[in-house]
Image (tube, grey):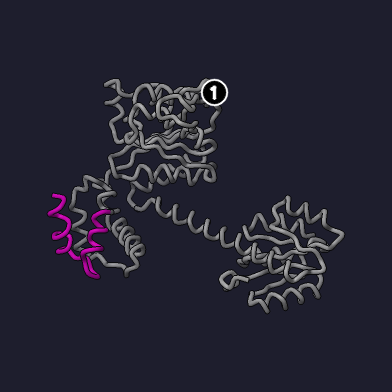
C-alpha cells in the first residue's frame, strides 16, 4: 500500500464480535495504521462525534443499533468514508448500505487483500474530501470581510439577515471598495451555498456579446457561434448570478434581464425554446444609479426588480479605523504566500497610512502593502511609508 496514504491514518472499527475487532486491529496496526474500536453502534457514534477518523469500518448486524443506523447517524456527523462489514447472508443489506452512502462493504470471512485495497481506495477518497474542504476554506478566506468599523459591522449584520432569503440585492460603492466580497458573502451564507456562484463583469464584455454571455446561444446564431453555449443564467441555475457593474449594461440587455427576472425563463440567442431558470441575482455598480435613471441610461423597472435590498459599501476614507486591520491582514496573507516571516507596522506607519486619501480604496491599499512587504525590512516605519507610498500616489 502507498506509504503516503498510511501516514497518521486513523481507523475506527465498530463490531460487536471481539474476535473480529482484535483481528482487524492486529492486521491494521501491522500495516502501521492507528486503530480505535467500539463494541457497539452507540459507542461507535460517541467516538465519531468526539474524534476525527480517516476511515470507519462498521459491522452491519449488531444488537441494539445495527450498522445501517450507525451509517445514517455517522453521515450526519462526518464525511469520513464508511466501509460496511457484512456476513455472507447479508449481501442484500450491504447493497442497501451502499445505496445509503457507504463507501464499500467487505464480506466475512475477511480477505486480507480485499481489505487493504478497500482501505487504500477509501483513504484516497478521504484525502480528496480533505483537500476539497481545504480549498473551500481558502476560497472563503479570499473573500473574507475584514474590518471592525461601525459601517462594516452594519453591512455584516445586514448580510446575516438577507443572505438566507432569495431577495435580490443591489450593491453600490466606488471601485475597489469590496462589492464583490459582499456578493460572495451573501452567497456563502445563503441556502444556495452548494450551488454555483457565477460572476459576470458587465463592463468588461462588449455590448454586442453581453446577451450571448448571459443567455447563451445556439450553434450558427452568429458568425463565431460554432457550437451551442449555455449562458450564465443557465450555468448559475440553482445558485447565484452576480452581475458586477450592471450600470454598464446596454438597454437591450437590460430588457432581457428584466424579462428573465419576471418570468424565471430565458431564451438563447438564435433559439426559440424557453428555458426555466432558478437563479438568485445579486447586482453591483460603481455608478450613481439615480443619475443613470434620470439620464435614461438605466431602466427604472429593472432597478426596482434588482434593488429589493440595497447595500452601500463605503469608501476606505470613510472607515479609516479599519486601515490598520486591513494592512495587517494583507501583510500576513502576502508573507504567507511568499513564504517569508511577517513584518510589523509601527504606530506611526499606521497613522501615516490613515492620512492617505485612498482613491483606489481597498484594492489600492492591498497593492501598497505588497509593495511595502517587498521593499521593507522586518519593521515598516513612517519613513518607509513616505519613501515608498506617498511619492507614488500623491
| Nearest the eye: 178 or 226 | 226
**Which secondary structure dominates the residues rendered in magenta?**
helix
Task: Answer with the quarter of the image where residue 277 lies.
Answer: top right
Residue at (35%, 42%) from the top-left corner?
A: 179
Task: Answer with the quarter of the image where residue 311 lies.
Answer: top left
Residue at (35%, 47%) from the top-left corner?
A: 152
Residue 190 percent location from the top left of the image: 51, 43
Residue at (42%, 39%) from the top-left corner?
A: 199
The vertical placement of 39 against 230, above or below, is: below
Tag count in the figure?
Answer: 1
Is 387 positioned to the left or the right of 124 in the image?
Answer: left
How crowded is the residue under tag 1: few (<14 C-alpha within 10 Å), some, or many (20+)?
A: few
The vertical placement of 135 against 311, above or below, is: below
Residue 2 percent location from the top left of the image: 60, 70
Q: Is residue 65 visible?
A: no
Task: Answer with the quarter of the image where residue 127 lies.
Answer: bottom right
Residue at (29%, 26%) from the top-left corner?
A: 290
| Nearest the eye: 259 or 216 | 216
The answer to whether residue 384 is magenta is yes
Name the secondary structure under disc 1: strand
Residue 71 percent location from the top left of the image: 72, 57
Is 386 positioned to the left or the right of 37 in the image?
Answer: left
The answer to whether residue 160 is magenta is no
Q: Which residue is mark 1?
A: 274
| Nearest the eye: 114 or 25 | 114
Q: Is residue 143 visible?
A: yes
| Extreme residue in the right direction | 89
Magenta stretch bounds? 367-394
| Nearest the eye: 343 or 222 | 222
Is 90 positioned to the left or the right of 245 in the image?
Answer: right
Residue 119 percent location from the top left of the image: 67, 66
Q: Quarter of the image for the N terminus: give it.
A: bottom right
Amino acid at each position: 500500500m502507498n506509504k503516503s496514504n498510511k501516514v497518521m491514518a486513523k481507523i475506527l472499527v465498530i463490531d460487536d464480535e471481539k474476535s473480529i475487532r482484535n483481528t482487524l486491529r492486529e492486521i491494521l496496526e501491522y500495516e502501521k495504521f492507528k486503530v480505535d474500536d467500539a463494541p457497539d453502534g452507540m459507542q461507535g457514534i460517541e467516538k465519531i462525534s468526539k474524534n476525527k477518523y480517516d476511515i470507519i469500518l462498521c459491522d452491519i448486524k449488531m444488537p441494539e443499533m445495527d450498522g445501517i443506523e450507525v451509517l445514517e447517524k455517522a453521515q450526519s456527523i462526518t464525511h469520513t468514508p464508511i466501509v460496511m462489514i457484512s456476513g455472507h447472508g447479508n449481501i442484500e443489506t450491504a447493497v442497501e448500505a451502499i445505496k445509503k452512502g457507504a463507501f464499500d462493504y467487505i464480506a466475512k470471512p475477511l480477505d486480507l487483500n480485499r481489505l487493504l485495497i478497500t482501505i487504500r481506495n477509501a483513504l484516497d477518497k478521504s484525502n480528496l474530501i480533505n483537500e476539497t474542504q481545504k480549498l473551500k476554506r481558502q476560497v472563503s478566506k479570499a473573500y473574507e470581510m475584514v474590518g471592525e468599523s461601525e459601517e462594516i459591522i452594519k453591512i455584516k449584520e445586514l448580510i446575516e439577515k438577507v443572505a438566507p432569503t432569495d431577495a435580490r440585492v443591489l450593491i453600490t460603492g466606488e471601485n475597489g471598495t469590496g462589492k464583490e466580497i459582499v456578493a460572495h458573502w451573501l452567497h456563502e451564507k445563503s441556502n444556495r451555498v452548494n450551488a454555483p456562484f457565477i460572476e459576470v463583469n458587465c463592463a468588461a464584455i462588449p455590448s454586442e456579446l453581453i446577451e450571448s454571455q448571459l443567455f447563451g446561444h445556439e450553434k450558427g446564431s452568429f458568425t463565431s457561434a460554432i457550437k451551442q453555449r449555455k449562458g450564465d443564467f443557465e450555468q448559475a441555475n440553482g445558485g447565484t448570478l452576480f452581475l458586477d457593474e450592471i450600470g454598464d449594461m446596454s438597454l437591450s440587455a437590460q430588457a432581457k434581464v428584466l424579462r428573465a427576472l419576471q418570468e424565471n425563463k430565458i431564451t438563447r440567442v438564435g433559439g426559440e425554446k424557453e428555458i426555466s431558470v432558478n437563479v438568485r441575482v445579486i447586482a453591483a455598480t460603481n455608478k450613481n444609479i439615480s443619475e443613470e435613471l434620470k439620464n435614461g441610461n438605466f431602466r427604472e423597472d429593472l432597478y426596482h426588480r434588482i434593488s429589493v435590498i440595497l447595500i452601500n459599501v463605503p469608501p476606505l476614507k470613510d472607515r479609516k479605523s479599519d486601515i490598520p486591520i486591513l494592512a495587517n491582514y494583507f501583510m500576513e496573507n502576502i508573507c504567507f504566500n511568499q513564504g517569508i516571516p511577517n513584518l510589523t507596522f509601527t504606530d506611526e506607519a499606521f497613522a501615516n497610512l490613515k492620512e492617505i486619501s485612498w482613491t483606489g480604496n481597498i484594492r489600492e491599499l492591498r497593492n501598497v502593502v505588497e509593495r511595502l512587504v517587498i521593499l521593507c525590512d522586518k519593521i515598516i516605519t513612517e519613513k518607509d511609508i513616505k519613501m515608498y507610498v506617498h511619492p507614488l500616489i500623491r
